Each structure stands twice: as C-alpha cells, then as structure tokens.
Amino acid sequence: MKHLIVVGACYLDTILKNVTIKTTHINIRRGGNCPNSLQVLEQLLADHDGLQLHLVSPLPNASSSAAQRVVSSFGQQSKIDFGHCLYREESTEAASSYIIRSEASGSRTLVNYNDLPEMTQDEFGNIARSFEADQETWWHFEGRIPETVQNCIRLLRNVLPKATISVEVEKPGREGLPELAAEADVVFYSRSWAEVRVDSKILGRGG
C-alpha cells in the first residue's frame, strides 16, 4: 500500500455574494488548498486501490459540529484517512475564511480567522513515526509556515529517508519560502510567486 499524506490548514469558507451593502446569498463550504487537493485526487484516483490518502490538519474537537462538517464535506463514500488530524479538544470552531464577493464588479474581499493552535514539530514527529520506514510514502506540505515545515521535512529525512516530499510555494512576500523549496523533492509554485521570481532575475535582484 502506498500512502499520500497532505499536511495543511483546513477552513470553512463562508461566501457572501452582495449588491452594495445587502447580502443576496450565503454559501458555507470547506476550503483550504490541501483538503481541496485531496478531494480532487480522490476523484481522479477512484479506481486506484493501492493508494491511501491521509489529511494532517488542526481541527476543532472531534465531537464539534465544525469538525463533523469538515469530515462530512468529503462525502460518505470518502476513503480519506482523518486519523492523523490534530483535534484540539478545547476548540469548537474550525479555521474560517469569510469571502465577500461583489456581484457587480466580481471583486473579492477575504478575511481569515483561525484560533486553532498550529501543528508542532513534536506532533508531526509522532505522525511520521507511525509509518514504517519501508512503506512508500509521499508527503505534501503547504508553505504557510516555512520554518515549521522546514523542520518537519528535516525530521522526515531522518525518520523516513525513502519518503518523497513536495511543498506548495504560493505567496511571493513570505519569508523563508526559497529555503523551504530547496528542501523538497518536488515544488508546486503559484503563478504570482513564479512571476515575482522571474522579474527579480531579470532586474538582477538575486535568486
């Protein structure tokens, strides 16, 4: 059995469509690059029985309606493993994004709220050690907190030296992303990050 472990934040997105100051429609759905990518992969690999998908994400108390809403959003038939998620017993609310979209202009205003404690290196170490060294694993990280992810990657290199590691590099102004990308086997770049890097090269401002 092969394993793909995706590590990143999971949000409940509240989308408000408005005309001037009156909201005309509210839609709440699960968000976050990592869980969304997992759901797409599960659909694409529906006939591939030899791969187990895992989500590693801080979530509120497992009995809370918010945590149950996140898990159920993948569908009753989902085979994604949520056993490595970090359920915060003292929390009842998931990380949230509030997206206000103008019907007239198409513009979006985004407000994030996250009161969940982030994953620690020790917590990740326990997860990594739950896999056997001879298992074929691919670990994918979002690059939201580069220093923590970099430490997790280095831990993985020691605990599971055969693991394949990929990272998502998205926001151009975030410190530590170039160093983080250098640690991975595979890097997924956002268009905005790549454009800024190319412009910097052309203007001679470094790598």
Image (cartoon, helix red, strand yellow):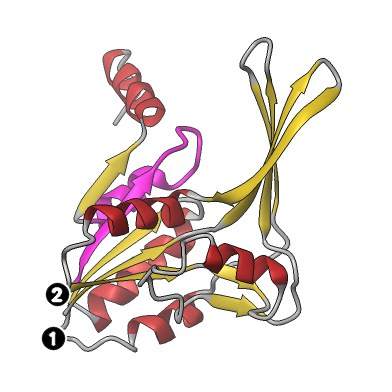
Q: Is residue 172 left or right of residue 203?
A: right
Residue 69's spot in the image, x, y percent? 62, 64
* Image position of 136 with respect to 44: above or below: below
Report the Cα–Cα distance between label 2 and label 1: 8 Å
The kind of residue tagged 1 is Asp
Q: Is residue 194 left or right of residue 2?
A: right
Q: Which residue carries the number 1 mark?
A: 134
Q: In the image, what residue occupies the spot 40% across and 26% down? A: 192
- Picture quarter with the N terminus: bottom left
Magenta-tinted stretch: 162-184
**Between discs 2 and 1, the one toward the N terminus:** 1
192 or 61, nearer to the observer: 61
Query: In this orientation, does residue 186 appear?
Result: yes
Q: Residue 67 carries which label?
A: none
The kind of residue tagged 2 is Lys
User: Does the CB distance between marks 2 and 1 fall below 8 Å?
Assistant: yes
Q: Which residue carries the number 2 mark?
A: 162
Q: In the image, what residue occupies the spot 60% across and 49% down? A: 29
**In what element is the residue under mark 2?**
loop
Based on the picture, tell me whether residue 51 belongs to the magenta stretch. no
Based on the picture, tell me whether residue 183 belongs to the magenta stretch. yes
Q: How crowded is mark 1: few (under 14 residues within 10 Å), some or many (20 or more)?
A: few
Q: How crowded is mark 2: few (under 14 residues within 10 Å), some or many (20 or more)?
A: some
Task: Locate residue 66: give its quadrant.
Answer: bottom right
Q: In the image, what residue occupies the spot 60% across and 54% down? A: 11
- Picture quarter with the C terminus: top left
Mark 2, mark 1: which one is toward the viewer?
1
Residue 46's spot in the image, x, y percent? 23, 61
**In what element is the residue under mark 1?**
loop
188 or 16, nearer to the observer: 16
